[in-house]
Image: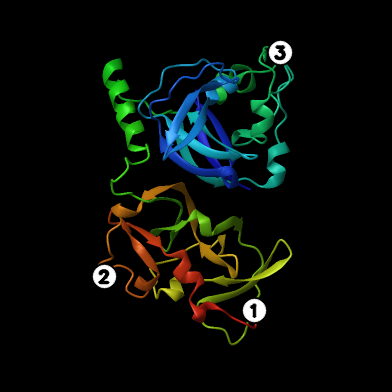
Amino acid sequence: MQLLNFSVDDIPCALPLSEVQSVIRIMQIAPVENPRRGQAGIINLHGRIIPVFSMRVLLGSVARPPRLSDMLVIVRAGTEILALWVDEMRGVRDLPTAAAHDAEPPQKAPLLPGISISPVGIIISDLLCLLSTIPDASGYAGLDRIIPSEDRLPGAVQEEPEPDAARVDAILSERAARMLPPEPGTLVCKVTEILRFHLAYQEYALEMKFVQEVILTGEITPVPGTPDFISGICAVRGRIISLVDLRALFRIPEKGLTDLNRVIVISDGKLTFGVLADTISGVGTVAINQLVPPRPEDLPGGQRYLTGVMGGNLYVLDGAAILGDPGIIIDDA
């Protein structure tokens, strides 16, 4: 299981990466009448009104005003898109399925519905169940009763003193304004959701619309006579797919040992195969107009597969170009 890890009141928490659409910085949250349990308000994300829920409140901790370093995790819960307000992001990691049951929960009070305890902390195993908990959750264990103080995150990041409240509000308002849909007649800036991953000491990204799932590398069966960029085939949920090694496809020089222990399953609805990766960095968004064309020295063997470069060091790959390359289709696989 791939988990997106974050902290709430210095408590390590996580939820399945498959439920996450993107992660953004906290912005101004507009209040609503008759909010649901734990709901801090709503945000306007590129024209879509999304409810925001405070993980502190949902988990029984003490609510507080927003800090500029707080984050919003945009998730899909059933048929609903919503945002979870968390304190700090802590990356992506794996959790074996059985590990969620390795630790015994405390017996002082029953756990909140929808959460479980594991060696990595609290796992939001059923967000819809957690959201539907009865308003009076006093009979359940809050964070202080689930995770004792000695088990909280060591060396939690000490934030710089926040600016005054007016300045914080102005910054949050500015962030919210940037997320509003453009005025009629203005140039529309396309924003796309991406999955970031590392391969051979370089960070890449693929648009989430092409990503079906991320799994651990299992048994790979070599296929004789295939190009060097086809590592072999493997079974994914009963289906046999080819595995593509982008290092060979892009002709990336070897820079040392790498650990290709992730498979990013990508598809355009017609063709499906797996892309090998070292690690998954996380999910996020990127504005297309912020991408710059690659320089001649940027990925020279794979520039035809590049949408552009972000910040000089993030290669955003063109999933349609990769999936649409007839040279990658291996009939025998």
Q: Which quadrant is the C terminus positioned in?
A: bottom right
Answer left or right for 324 relative to 78.
left
User: Which disc number belongs to residue 270?
Assistant: none
Q: CA distance from mark 3 to mark 2?
A: 61 Å
Q: Residue furthest front?
A: 185
Q: Tell me if mark 3 has few (under 14), some (14-19) or many (20+) residues whose alpha carbon lies within 10 angstroms of its own.
A: few
Q: Is residue 113 visible?
A: yes
Residue on which disc 3 sits = 139
Mark 2 belongs to which amino acid?
Glu
Q: Is residue 245 visible?
A: no
Note whether 119 is above or below 199 in the view shown: above
Q: Residue at x 63, y 17 (%)?
A: 145
Residue on which disc 1 sits = 333
The earlier-in-sequence mark between 1 and 2 is: 2
Answer left or right for 75 relative to 194.
right
Q: Quadrant of residue 265?
A: bottom right
Note whether 293 is above or below 21 in the view shown: below
Q: Residue 229 or 37: which is nearer the viewer?
A: 37
The earlier-in-sequence mark between 3 and 2 is: 3
Answer left or right for 125 relative to 325.
right
Q: Quadrant of residue 233?
A: bottom right
